[in-house]
Each structure stands twice: as structure tokens, then as C-alpha cells.
Image (spheres, rainbow, N blue to C red):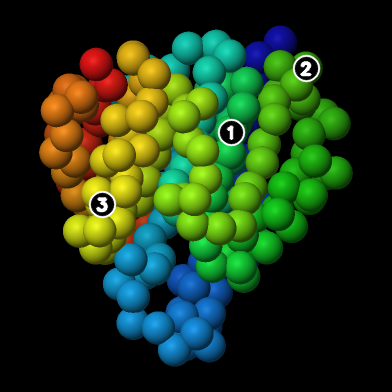
Amino acid sequence: MSLDAARALEILDALYAGVDGYRLSHGERNRLQTEDRGLVYGEILARPFGELLETAGVHPGEEFWDAGAGTGKPVFTAALLFPFARCCGVEVLAPLADKAESLLLRYQREMLPSLPEEKRRQEIRFITGRFEDVDLSGADVLFSHCTTYSPGMLEHLCRAAAGLKAGSRIITVGQALAWPELEPVFEGPVLMDWGESICHVYRRD
């Protein structure tokens, strides 16, 4: 038995009810007294994000990575809607990463036991740190909500994408990647929590 999309979206809604990543991000950036625009929070909507993943293409047993995972919603969306074997997120702001971890514990305790075996076999993991310092080379699908990334951060993301194996797909929100090894597959508007944004899908040659 597989998990249908309607049930997956219900689980996501229940899991993220009352979660305010914007507040957590704003509070931590104030505490750090940083004006780094690359840390500005943005959130997906599950259904449009699922459609974006369908555009990129997902094969059973693949790995999904989110560079800048926030509270982890893209990771859970990828895990629930698609047959990934492993879904991982990297987030530098500790309160956001901590929230993702607490949601993972709740998911494992309250929701996962009643889900199909294919979902119980999935690995979901969150890492606190900068994505530039994490080995992303295992990703078959690499996602980044990089709308406010600086040129330096965007170059790091390009290098990470170029380091993936041939055939891997890269999805970005808000900014395009320019790198010889990346073949553009899709460019178009996708609805996010905060409004419409231009998204890009690339394939690693």
C-alpha cells in the first residue's frame, strides 16, 4: 500500500499547524544582530512544491537534500509525496533547525507508525550548519530556496550543484544558477507561502 497525495498533504498540514518559521528566523537574526540577507526566511506551499518536484522527476530510492532547510517543510513534503529513500535538510539558524528536529520526533512518534512500510523505511535527517560545509554530493535532487542569497552564497550553491553526479536535478527558488555543467530544464512561476516566485530546475550533465 502506498500513501496517497491527499493523505500526505493532511499529515503535512497537521504537522505544521502553528509553526511560524518567519518568527523563529526573525528572532534569531535579531539575537545575532545580523543583517545577512541570505538568512531571510521563505516558505514553500506543499502542493505547488510537489508539482515542482514532479517536474524535476523523482525515481524510487533517490536522495533529496535541502540547502537552507528552515523548519524542514520541503524535506517532509519530499518524503511524504515521493519515494525517496533519504531526505535531508541543512539549516544554519539553530532555532529553525531545532524546530525541524522536534517536528521529526513528533512525526516519528505520532504519524509514522500508521504509514505504509515504504515510508517507515525512509531516512529523514536534519543537520545544523552551513550548507557550504556539508557534503551534498549524495543528492539526486538538490533544492535551495535561495531568493536572498548573496553572490558568494550563490557561487557556493553552484559549486555544490556542479559536484553532484550526472543526472542529478537541482531546484532553485528566486535566483538562477549559471554553471557550465548545469542544463536548464524548467523556468517558471511557482506559488510560495509569501507569493509567486520564479523557480528553476536544472539537470547535472
- Rounded to the nearest angstrom, the CA distance separating label 2 from label 1 is 16 Å
Can residue 58 be seen from the camera position used here? yes
Quadrant of the drawing holding the C terminus: top left
What is the secondary structure assignment of the residue under circle 3?
helix
Callout 2: few (<14), some (14-19), or many (20+) C-alpha neighbours within 10 Å? few
Give whichever of 96, 196 is nearer the camera: 96
Quadrant of the drawing holding the N terminus: top right
Which of the 4 image quadrants contains residue 47? top left
Residue 155 vs residue 168: left or right?
left
The amino acid at mark 1 is Cys
Q: Are marks 2 and 3 in contact (CB under 8 Å)?
A: no
Residue 96 vs residue 182: left or right?
right
Callout 3: few (<14), some (14-19), or many (20+) C-alpha neighbours within 10 Å? many
Q: Are marks 1 and 3 in contact (CB under 8 Å)?
A: no
Can residue 54 be seen from the camera position used here? no
Q: Earlier in the sequence, mark 2 or mark 3?
A: 2
- Rounded to the nearest angstrom, the CA distance separating label 2 from label 3 is 38 Å
On the image, numbered disc 2 is attached to which residue? 117
What is the secondary structure assignment of the residue under circle 2?
helix
Which label sits in the foreground, 1 or 3? 3
On the image, numbered disc 3 is attached to which residue? 154
Residue 49 vs residue 138: left or right?
left
Which label sits in the foreground, 2 or 3? 3
Residue 122 at x, y percent in the picture: 69, 25
Residue 145 at x, y percent in the picture: 35, 51
Q: In the image, what residue occupies the spot 48% across and 36% down? A: 136
The amino acid at mark 2 is Glu
Q: In the image, what residue occupies the spot 30% across and 56% down? A: 153
Q: Earlier in the sequence, mark 1 or mark 3?
A: 1
- Which numbered dot is residue 87? 1
The amino acid at mark 3 is Leu
